[in-house]
Image (tube, grey):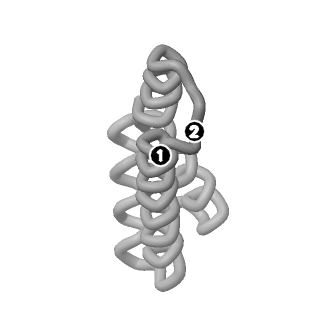
């Protein structure tokens, strides 16, 4: 079974890339039994959503002086 340290690393990694099915299952099993890791997962998801909202607001703001091409590159980098 994965340790909390392993799960925290994998949860963070899963925000940037898809994990193999086996790892995803191991994480779910761990989270089912652990009291702390579900909170970490919720916090990571919250931070991800907040960063995306902030990104959208910044890109739509008149204060940001970026070309349409630069805005699109940023959008693609933030949303894989």
Q: Is residue 50 visible?
A: yes
- Rendered position, 24 above or below 69: below
- Using a 10 Å C-alpha cutoff, classify the residue at mark 2 as few (fewer than 14 neighbours), some (14 to 19) or many (20 or more): few
Can you identify the residue that label 1 sits on? 61
The residue at the far right in this view is 5
Q: Is residue 6 left or right of residue 17?
A: right
Circle 1: element type: loop
Q: Position of residue 75 (x, y in %)?
A: 44, 30
- Residue occupying the far top of the picture: 69
Q: Is the C terminus in the top left, top right, bottom left or bottom right quadrant?
A: top left
Q: How many marks?
A: 2
Considering only vertical position in the picture, is 52 above or below 36?
above
> In front here: 58 or 26?
58
Q: Residue at x 48, y 78 (%)?
A: 39
Q: Residue at x 42, y 55 (%)?
A: 53
Where in the figure is residue 73, as x and y percent of width and height? 50, 20
Can you identify the residue that label 2 sits on? 64
Q: Is residue 61 left or right of residue 25?
A: right
Q: Distance between the Cα atoms at labels 1 and 2? A: 6 Å
Q: Which residue shows up at 41% across the image and 34% down it?
A: 79
Q: Using the image as rendered, state which of residue 58 and residue 19 is in the foreground.
A: 58
Query: Which quadrant of the figure has residue 64?
Result: top right
Q: Which residue sits at x=37%, y=48%?
A: 24
Residue furthest to the bottom in view is 35
Q: In the drawing, what numbered circle is on residue 36?
A: none
Image coordinates of residue 10 in percent, x first then y, are: 55, 50
Q: Are marks 1 and 2 in contact (CB under 8 Å)?
A: yes
Mark 1 surroundings within 10 Å by alpha-carbon count, few (fewer than 14), some (14 through 19), many (20 or more): few
Nearer the observer, 8 or 46: 46
């Amino acid at each position: 079974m994965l340790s909390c340290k392993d799960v925290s690393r994998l949860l963070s990694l899963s925000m940037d890339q898809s994990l193999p099915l086996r790892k995803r299952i191991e994480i779910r099993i761990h989270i089912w039994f652990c009291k702390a890791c579900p909170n970490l997962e919720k916090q990571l998801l919250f931070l991800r959503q907040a960063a995306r909202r902030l990104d959208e607001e910044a890109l739509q703001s008149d204060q940001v002086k970026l070309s349409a091409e630069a805005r699109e590159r940023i959008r693609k980098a933030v949303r894989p």
